[in-house]
């Protein structure tokens, strides 16, 4: 009479095996995409110098990927709620491979920036869909543990990427273009593996329903693009009170108002206004926006700090960023396990916010000759804070969202985090340029100047190198000091969140 129980156990076991296989395949795709991105970061100062670009070009080479990824997130989130998510992941990896090939063949800065934008479209899909797929397979209370594994894989890609990129850039006969060739191979391999192994319970979704809000996407793109242009121009020799900067800045609130109006009237809005009425979702998005500069802008700035202010090679500068990456890993994994075990998240996130403030504050005192041990400790503290806060905001917001809004809420929080990184990079990059110009005018070291390109220390003599290092060291300290308010805003948003225990089942709400 007890015979019928066996098939039930077998079905549960098969479901668990299918879930594990799906998550492994997804993690493989994330690793490939992230490694393909991070392998370029350390080499970028040399890439921009070889293509005769300046600080503004460096900002746009980094921002192009971030902007495209950020602005595509809501569309990927909407598509994930109605289309086959496995197909979407493969399309996003294909776009990333196409962008990587474009960058590898770039002959000037403009072509490189265009290729990086295509890379960003693919990266946005991988990042958004990873969180959505995990949310579809795993209950909220268990997502902290799985998000810790995601961060572990992301950290592995981040750890391997910068040193590998530095080695490729330093190797004669290989050079920085190999970083982009590697991206093509990894993205293609990940797409093939996902095709063979990824099985999702919702793979039968269809695209029926209202079309994605393309007008809303266009207005959001125009708003963010205008803001980035105004900030970038103002920090690179164009006066604040000038037609290009003033006109573009005045267009930002107009475009933003049109975007909000469109969202309130659209049948299927890109970012449903009701999301902002939920306190947990709104504050999670605000905290994500504030932590964005530390997660996305800091690694790009650190590559310049170590290679220009500290006169290190790309390979060595990649190794010097490892304390921050180690902090990201330990913070995300430890906090994920604690949150999954207890179902409570407020105390770990508050501790993470404090570590982020501490790390940025100490980096604000760094210069060209600050002991590397102190710099490493500050990076570890800041990285730990980023790992704790950024990785846990998504499941917290998902916990408060109804099932029908899962994709929209996920993309909204990730969008806010990425948008903070984009605007933080533009603002901090412009501040760096302004501070370098001001300090150069005061100290006038050979080889630099307000109209000069990004310094290439290989082409300068010892006296000029010393002057460049002094100027950039002081400028980077000022930039990290200016980033402290972002960390304080993240801490304030976390403290204002009302703690609700994470749900332990998928159908609970």
Image (cartoon, rainbow, N blue to C red):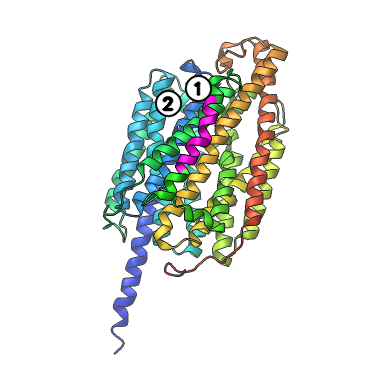
69 vs 387: above or below: above
Q: In the image, what residue occupies the spot 58% across and 28% down?
A: 429
Q: Position of residue 366 (x, y in %)?
A: 71, 31
| Res. 373 in view | no
The foreground one among 371 and 345 is 345
455 vs 158: above or below: above
Q: Residue furthest bottom?
A: 1
Q: Position of residue 252 (x, y in %)?
A: 52, 33
Q: CA distance from mark 1 to mark 2?
A: 8 Å
473 vs 324: above or below: above
- The total number of labels drawn is 2
Few, some or many residues within 10 Å of mark 2 (<14, 14–19, 20+): many
The foreground one among 312 and 350 is 350
Q: Main secondary structure of the magenta part?
A: helix
Q: Assign a secondary structure to mark 2.
A: helix
Residue that carries the numbered disc 2 in the rendered image: 113
Give the magenta part as a residue range. Answer: 247-259
Few, some or many residues within 10 Å of mark 1 (<14, 14–19, 20+): many
Q: Is residue 277 left or right of residue 120?
A: right
Q: Position of residue 413 (x, y in %)?
A: 50, 50
Q: Is residue 146 left or right of residue 8?
A: right
Q: Is residue 302 left or right of residue 33?
A: right
Q: Position of residue 160 (x, y in %)?
A: 49, 38
Residue that carries the numbered disc 1 in the rendered image: 57
Q: Assign a secondary structure to mark 1.
A: helix
The foreground one among 86 and 282 is 282
Is the residue under label 2 in contact with that under label 1 (CB below 8 Å)? yes
Marks 1 and 2, the one that precedes in the sequence: 1
Residue 220 on the magenta segment: no
Q: Which quadrant of the figure has residue 356? A: top right
The foreground one among 282 and 22 is 282
């Amino acid at each position: 009479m007890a015979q019928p129980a066996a098939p039930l156990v077998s079905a549960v076991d098969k479901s668990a095996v299918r879930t594990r296989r799906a998550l492994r395949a997804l993690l493989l795709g994330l690793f490939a995409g992230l490694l393909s991105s991070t392998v370029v970061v350390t080499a970028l100062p040399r890439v921009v110098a070889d293509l005769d670009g300046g600080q503004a070009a460096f900002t746009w080479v980094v921002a192009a990927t971030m902007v495209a990824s950020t602005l595509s997130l809501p569309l990927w989130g909407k598509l994930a709620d109605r289309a086959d998510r496995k197909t979407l992941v493969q399309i996003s990896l294909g776009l990333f491979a196409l962008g990587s090939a474009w960058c590898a063949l770039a002959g000037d800065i403009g072509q490189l920036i265009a290729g990086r934008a295509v890379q960003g479209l693919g990266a946005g899909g991988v990042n958004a869909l990873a969180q959505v797929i995990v949310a579809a397979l795993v209950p909220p209370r268990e997502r902290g543990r799985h998000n810790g594994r995601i961060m572990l894989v992301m950290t592995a890609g981040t750890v391997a990427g910068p040193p590998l990129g530095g080695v490729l850039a330093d190797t004669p006969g290989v050079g920085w273009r190999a970083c982009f060739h590697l991206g093509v191979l990894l993205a293609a391999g990940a797409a093939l593996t996902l095709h063979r192994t990824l099985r999702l319970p919702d793979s039968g979704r269809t695209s029926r329903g209202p079309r994605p809000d393309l007008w809303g996407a266009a207005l959001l793109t125009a708003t963010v693009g205008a803001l980035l242009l105004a900030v970038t121009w103002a920090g690179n020799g164009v006066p604040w009170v000038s037609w290009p900067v003033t006109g573009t800045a005045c267009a930002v609130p107009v475009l933003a108002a049109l975007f909000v109006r469109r969202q309130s009237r659209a049948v299927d809005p890109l970012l449903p206004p009701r999301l902002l009425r939920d306190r947990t979702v709104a504050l999670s998005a605000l905290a994500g926006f504030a932590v964005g500069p530390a997660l996305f802008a800091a690694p790009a700035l650190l590559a310049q700090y170590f290679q220009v202010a500290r006169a290190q090679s790309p390979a060595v500068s990649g190794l010097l960023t490892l304390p921050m990456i180690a902090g990201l890993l330990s913070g995300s994994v430890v906090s994920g396990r604690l949150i999954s075990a207890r179902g409570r998240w407020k105390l770990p996130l508050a501790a993470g916010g404090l570590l982020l403030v501490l790390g940025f504050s100490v980096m604000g005192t760094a210069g060209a000759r600050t002991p590397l041990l102190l710099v490493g400790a500050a990076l570890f503290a800041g990285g730990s804070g980023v790992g704790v806060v950024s990785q846990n905001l998504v499941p917290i917001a998902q916990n408060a969202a109804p099932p029908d809004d899962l994709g929209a809420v996920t993309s909204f929080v990730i969008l806010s985090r990425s948008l903070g990184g984009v605007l933080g990079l533009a603002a901090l990059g412009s501040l760096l340029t302004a501070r370098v110009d001001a300090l150069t005018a005061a100290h006038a070291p050979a080889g630099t100047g307000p109209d000069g390109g990004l310094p290439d220390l290989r082409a300068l003599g010892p006296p000029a190198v010393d002057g460049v290092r002094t100027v950039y060291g002081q400028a980077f300290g000022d930039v990290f000091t200016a980033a402290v308010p972002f960390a304080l805003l993240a801490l304030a948003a976390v403290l204002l969140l009302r703690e609700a225990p994470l749900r332990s089942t998928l159908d609970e709400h």
